[in-house]
Amino acid sequence: MSGPRISVVGTGLYVPDRLVTNEDLAKVLDTSDEWIRTRTGIKQRYFAEPGTGAAPLGAEAGRRALAAAKVAPEDIDLVLCATMTPDYIIPSCAALIQRDLKLENAGGFDLMAACSGWVFGTVTAAQFLAAGTARHVLLVGAEQMTSVIDPEDRGTRVIFGDGAAAAVIRASRDDEPGQLLHSKMRLAGNDELLYIPAGGSRQPSIDAASIERRDHYVKMKGREIFRFAVTRFGELIEDALQGAGVTVDDIKLVIPHQVNLRIIESAVDRVGLSMDRVLLNIDRYGNTSGASVGIALHEAADSGRIERGDLVLMVAFGAGLSWGSALLRW
Ligand code: UT7
């Protein structure tokens, strides 16, 4: 089969210490554990202290991935950070992670694809490795979602969590099975269903009026996003199977963006996959956007749910609107 021959040689995960349960949120918002669990599948999530930033979370995940991969910091030549909550507009999170991890020989940049960030990042890393312009890529997904979520909006506050994941990826050696068998990245530009009005070049200054409108926080039309996600998720899985010429039975594990248990269940049902071949951890982390698929991938690898040679299908969907997939032979 064609496709860049790449191997993930080490992964890492880091979440902040503060664990927030549904009951904790129900004390400060008009919501309940029952509503959150039945509508989303979430039981808890982690919140970083205000002012932490995404880069320190990503750097810690990166440190763990480097240790797991037994790759020295100076051997990383590209650091990619998938994030929608960068510490600053400039410099990039990638630059801060480069500094923190002393990646002396690395270039890098941030990749803004919201919840599709980890999947788009994997596809991007593979291109650099296939072209030979990078030998070791450190892919990081890092988010402090609490920095952009309105603490008073129950529709979004209960869904998102903070956290980071990282992976060291390099070209596969001759005796290694690793390969990106199929990938897809798509956009359908939309700044109405899921966006943050202020803080960018359209509305750069956050003044009293914009704070009053709460324009510095995520605005989300949840129900519309839900419908779009269900359709796209199903299509992504079907496309990947067709594109790589494999059947649903060949897939060892589907690792979906941890968006909403109901969205995942209906997409998986549509393609005839059983839930025991889907990695779910939304109950413990909530939706960590660009870090979500990476966190799940780390847990799959770390727990032995995927082994070398297995087919692993990552699928994600998010703001942009964006959606994509990466089918890996592990
Ligand atoms: O990574 C992409 C990010 N986007 C997403 O993950 C969003 C995908 N969408 C969803 O996951 C779901 O649409 C939500 C979980 C956001 C909402 O679930 P839903 O079943 O679509 O609920 P809804 O928006 O249709 O709202 C139903 C009711 C409303 O009350 P009324 O108008 O029927 O009286 C909401 O006000 O539920 C209310 N509601 C809540 N109630 C208790 C909304 N949020 C909450 C809440 N607790 N946290």
Image: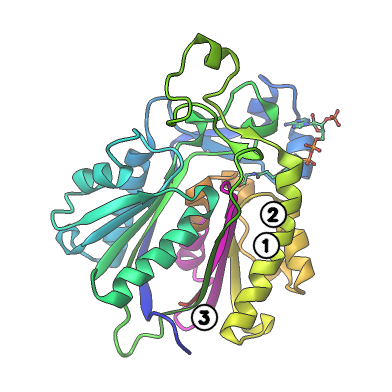
For the residue pair 84 and 154, the one nearer the viewer reads as 84
Residue where numbered disc 1 is placed? 233
Badge 3: few (under 14), some or many (20 or more) residues near its Cα, within 10 Å? some
Measured Cα–Cα span from mark 1 to mark 2: 6 Å
- In the rendered structure, does residue 78 fall within the stretch colored magenta? no
Is any atom of residue 37 visible in this view?
A: no
Tell me the magenta residue range. Answer: 296-325
Whether the residue carrying mark 2 lies under 8 Å from ligand 1 is answered with yes
State left or right for residue 195 relative to residue 302: right
Counting the numbered discs, the total is: 3
Q: Secondary structure at mark 1?
A: helix
324 or 303, nearer to the observer: 324
Percent coordinates x, y for residue 177 in the rendering: 41, 85
Q: CA distance from mark 3 to mark 2?
A: 26 Å
Vertical comparison of 319 with 35: above or below: below
Residue 260 seen by the camera: yes
Whether residues under marks 1 and 2 lie with C-beta atoms below 8 angstroms apart, the answer is yes
The percent position of residue 76, horizontal first and vertical second, equals: 21, 62
Q: Which residue is mark 2?
A: 229
Which image quadrant shows ligand 1?
Answer: top right
- Give the residue number, with chain letter if any, for mark 3: 310
Which one is closest to the eye, mark 3 or mark 1? 1
Instruction: Provide residue 40's location: percent of width, then percent of height.
Output: 72, 45
Q: Amino acid at mark 1?
A: Phe
Query: Quadrant of residue 7 in the image?
Result: bottom left
Extreme-top residue of the structure = 208
**Which x, y percent locates residue 306?**
51, 73
Neighbourhood count class around disc 2 (C-alpha, 10 Å): few under 14, some 14–19, many 20 upward: many
- Mark 3 residue CB less than 8 A from any atom of ligand 1: no
